[in-house]
Amino acid sequence: MRFASLTSCRVRAALLAAGLLHERGYGSHAYTFKHALVQDAAYSSMLRDERRRLHQRIARTLVEKFPETAENQPELVAHHYSQARESEAAIDFWRKAAQQASKRSAFVEASTHLQTALKQIAEMPESERRDKIELPLQEAFASASIAAKGFGAVQTMDALVRAVELCERSGDHLRTISVLNGMVGVRMVRGEFEQSLSVSQDLLERAKTQSDATALLMGHRALGMSLFVLGRLDEACGHLREAIELYDPVRHAPLALVFAQDLKASTQAYLGLATVVAGRVEAGLGHCCEALAHAEQLRHPHSICYVLPFMTGAYLAAGRAEEALPLAERTIALSNRYVFPQWQAARLPIHCSHQH
């Protein structure tokens, strides 16, 4: 265990004399404690301001003199900035740590980092600047929570509700569309299908006022999904196809890291199942296969896990259970590996309202 710099010479000398502290190299001014409890005791003996300055110095040293460590272990820098009570710097590094975790599909870890960042927000005085910093954190936390806990989780809904409130304050129309997109999923999973339809219609109307293909893609996708769970299959398929046509691989594929799912893969999975349930079996299974191939090409585990249950449902709806079984088994294996609870449950949105 290292203690980079003991600011109290008297404490340091006493610990060295007692054999409880060892210098890592002659004249190095870096030390190793004999036991973690000794380190904790030495730390707690320091004055609060002294500890804060020490953490501040460690954080700045990591950033300035060890940039590779700061880049690869942003959570380490974030911890020291948090203890130094430098909120904005801490938030920035907790966000970077969450992004790194999300890239590895470690969404539970990402959620934890973002929760810590949001606690730092609470220490900042209320202001437009604070709202501006908080909004993307709440949005990122909602996306990570969807993957880690599911759309129906209380923390997912709380983050989205707060994000909507912040969007209304800021007047950020494009970000409002993004947040409403998440809210549609929450309403659907909770079985609030009429509310989901209302939110998705609002989303698409807002998107039409923006000169932004991504907003329109999300609008048609959300409305198609909402119409599907209400059994309005032809309308649903129309909107889902429009969403897919708006997908640009260069622009939209990287958004899988933002939304924890690829917009095309998830849309085409819905289209495939809706098309099969509507009676066009081969066309629907073809859409499912394309969705899975696209998600696999992206090498994005959560997108793959999103597609597989829908594909399983499509084969079941087509009466081909023997082909559905290996897909279900793959869903379970992949969701267990990456800890995706909603896909471990693999609840498919197939409702009695759907008619062939």
Image (cartoon, rainbow, N blue to C red):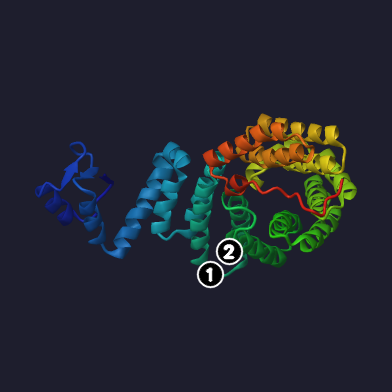
The residue lying at 42 percent from left, 54 percent from top is 81
Q: Nearer the viewer, residue 231 or 209?
A: 231
Splitting the image into 4 quarters, where does residue 181 fall?
bottom right
Indicate the amino acid at tag 1. Answer: Pro
Marking on residue 130:
2
Are the residues at dot 1 and dot 2 in contact (C-beta closer than 8 Å)? yes
Image vertical order of residue 114 relative to residue 282, above or below: below
Q: Is residue 123 left or right of residue 18?
A: right
Q: Nearer the viewer, residue 166 or 266?
A: 266
Label 1 element class? loop
Q: Is residue 207 left or right of residue 303?
A: right
Image vertical order of residue 28 relative to residue 200, above or below: above
Q: Position of residue 225 (x, y in %)?
A: 79, 50
The residue lying at 24 percent from left, 50 percent from top is 36
Q: Which residue is mark 1?
A: 125
- CA gap between label 1 and label 2 equals 7 Å
Label 2 element class? helix
Q: Position of residue 230 (x, y in %)?
A: 82, 55
Q: Is residue 342 visible?
A: yes
Q: Residue furthest bottom?
A: 126
Q: Is residue 252 visible?
A: no
Q: Position of residue 95 (x, y in %)?
A: 53, 50
The residue lying at 70 percent from left, 55 percent from top is 182
Image vertical order of residue 112 relative to residue 324, above or below: below
